[in-house]
C-alpha cells in the first residue's frame, strides 16, 4: 500500500514557518507583508476560496485586503483598482480571483498586475523568468505539488516525471519546476497517444487533468510517486464527493506514495500563496527572504 502524502499536515507546517518568518520581518525590519485579493462577481466557489485566503493571510500575521466588486463592474474599473494596488506600497501581493465575468478580458487584467506583486505567478514576465531559469514568483499549485514530491522523494534529480495536463496554471509551470529539479520531463495532454504507456514510464506522476479518476493503478510503474492535482466533484451513492484525477483505490495498491483528494495538493495552494507574498514583500524591501 502506498504511503499517503499528507498535504494538509505539510501545509499546516509551512504556514507555521511562514508565521514565524512574518514575526521576524516585523521585528527586524518593520515589514508586514500584505495581500490584496480582488473578487468580481458572486461565483460561490470563488467566494469560498477568497474567504479562506483572507482568513489564512490574517492567521500568519500578514495584512489582508478583500476587494469585492459586483459582477457587472466594467473592465476599466477592475484595471483602475489593479493600478491603485500596484501603487500602494503596503500591498506586496495582488491576486485577482479567476474566473472573471465574461465581459472582462482575464489576460488583460493579469497583465496589468505589476510582475513584482504577481503572487499567482501568471504574468508573462514571471512565466518567462520561470522558463529561463530565473528567480520569479511561481504559480502556487505547481510550487505546492513539487514541495510535496520533494518531501517524499528528497532529491528529484534524474527521475522520469510525467505531467498530465498542459494548462498555464498547472501543467506547464509544474513541468518547468520539475525540469529545474533535473527530472526528465514528459508533458502529456489530450492528444497524447497511449497515455497509459507514457505514464508507466514515470517515477513521478503529476496529474492535472480535470477528469475524475482517469489514471488507473495499472497505468503506474510499481512504486511510483503520484501527485494528484485534480479536484473533481462527482455524485456517488446519491452523495456529492470530491475525487482527484487518479483512481485512488487502484493507484494506492501500486504507487509508492500518493496524495489523497481532498487533503493532498489542495491545502498547499493557499500556503504557497502566503509564501509568495512574503517573498514579494522581501524583494520589495530589498532584504533576503527568510527560511520558510
Ligand atoms: P485545464 O482544463 O486548464 O487543463 C486540463 C489539461 O488536461 C489540458 O492540458 C488537457 O489537454 C488535459 N487533458 C484533458 N483531457 C485529457 C485526457 N483525456 N487525457 C490526457 N490529457 C487530458 O485544467 P487545470 O490545469 O486548470 O486543472 C486541472 C485539474 O487541477 C482540475 O481538476 C482542477 O480542478 C485542478 N486544480 C486544482 C488546484 C488546487 O489544488 N488548488 C488548482 C488548480 C487546478 P489539452 O491541452 O490537449 O486540452
Image (cartoon, rainbow, N blue to C red):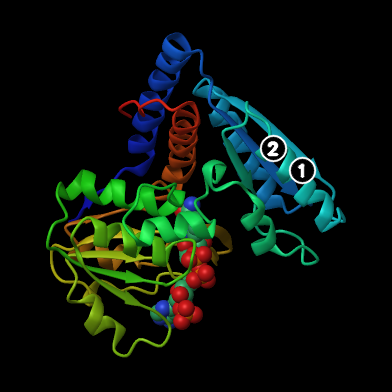
Q: Is residue 49 above or below residue 190?
A: above
Q: Is residue 281 above or below residue 265?
A: above
Q: Measured from the top left, where is residue 55 in percent x and y?
A: 59, 30
Number of dots carrying numbers: 2
Judging depth in this view, the residue of 72 and 242 nearest the camera is 72
Q: Is residue 36 above or below residue 201?
A: above
Residue 81: which disc? 1
Callout 1: 10 Å neighbours few (<14), some, many (20+)? some
Judging depth in this view, the residue of 173 and 216 nearest the camera is 173
Question: In the displayed structure, does residue 49 sit left or right of residue 154?
Answer: right
Q: Residue furthest bottom?
A: 193
Residue occupying image coordinates x 48% and y 26%: 285
Q: Residue furthest top?
A: 27
Which image quarter holds the N terminus? bottom left
Residue 72: which disc? none
Callout 2: 10 Å neighbours few (<14), some, many (20+)? many
Q: Mark yes or no: residue 242 visible.
A: no
- In the rendered image, which residue does mark 2 sit on? 85
Residue occupying image coordinates x 48% and y 36%: 280
As measured in the structure, the alpha-carbon distance from the residue carrying label 1 to the one carrying label 2 is 6 Å
Residue occupying image coordinates x 41% and y 43%: 268
Q: Quadrant of residue 7?
A: top left
Q: Measured from the top left, where is residue 270 in percent x and y?
A: 49, 41
Residue occupying image coordinates x 12% and y 62%: 158
**Secondary structure of residue under mark 2:** helix
Amino acid at each position: 500500500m502506498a504511503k499517503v502524502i499528507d498535504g494538509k499536515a505539510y501545509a499546516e507546517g509551512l504556514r507555521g514557518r511562514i508565521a514565524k518568518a512574518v514575526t521576524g520581518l516585523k521585528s527586524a525590519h518593520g515589514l508586514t507583508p500584505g495581500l490584496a485579493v480582488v473578487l468580481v462577481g458572486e461565483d460561490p466557489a470563488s467566494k469560498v476560496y477568497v474567504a479562506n485566503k483572507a482568513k489564512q493571510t490574517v492567521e500568519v500575521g500578514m495584512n489582508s485586503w478583500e476587494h469585492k466588486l459586483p459582477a457587472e463592474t466594467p473592465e476599466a474599473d477592475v484595471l483602475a483598482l489593479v493600478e491603485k494596488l500596484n501603487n500602494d506600497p503596503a500591498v506586496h501581493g495582488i491576486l485577482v480571483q479567476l474566473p472573471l465575468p465574461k465581459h472582462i478580458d482575464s489576460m488583460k487584467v493579469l497583465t496589468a498586475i505589476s510582475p513584482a506583486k504577481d503572487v499567482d505567478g501568471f504574468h508573462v514576465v514571471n512565466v518567462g523568468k520561470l522558463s529561463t531559469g530565473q528567480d520569479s514568483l511561481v504559480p502556487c499549485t505547481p510550487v505546492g505539488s513539487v514541495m510535496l514530491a520533494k518531501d517524499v522523494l528528497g532529491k528529484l534529480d534524474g527521475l522520469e516525471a510525467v505531467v498530465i495536463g498542459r494548462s498555464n496554471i498547472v501543467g506547464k509551470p509544474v513541468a518547468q519546476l520539475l525540469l529545474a529539479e533535473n527530472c526528465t520531463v514528459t508533458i502529456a495532454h489530450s492528444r497524447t497517444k497511449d497515455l497509459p504507456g507514457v505514464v508507466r514510464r514515470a517515477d513521478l506522476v503529476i496529474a492535472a487533468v480535470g477528469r475524475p479518476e482517469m489514471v488507473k493503478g495499472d497505468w503506474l510503474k510499481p512504486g511510483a510517486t503520484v501527485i494528484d492535482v485534480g479536484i473533481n466533484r462527482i455524485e456517488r451513492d446519491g452523495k456529492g464527493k470530491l475525487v482527484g484525477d487518479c483512481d485512488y483505490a487502484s493507484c494506492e495498491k501500486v504507487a509508492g506514495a500518493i496524495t489523497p483528494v481532498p487533503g493532498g495538493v489542495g491545502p498547499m495552494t493557499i500556503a504557497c500563496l502566503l509564501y509568495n507574498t512574503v517573498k514579494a514583500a522581501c524583494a520589495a524591501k530589498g532584504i533576503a527572504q527568510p527560511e520558510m
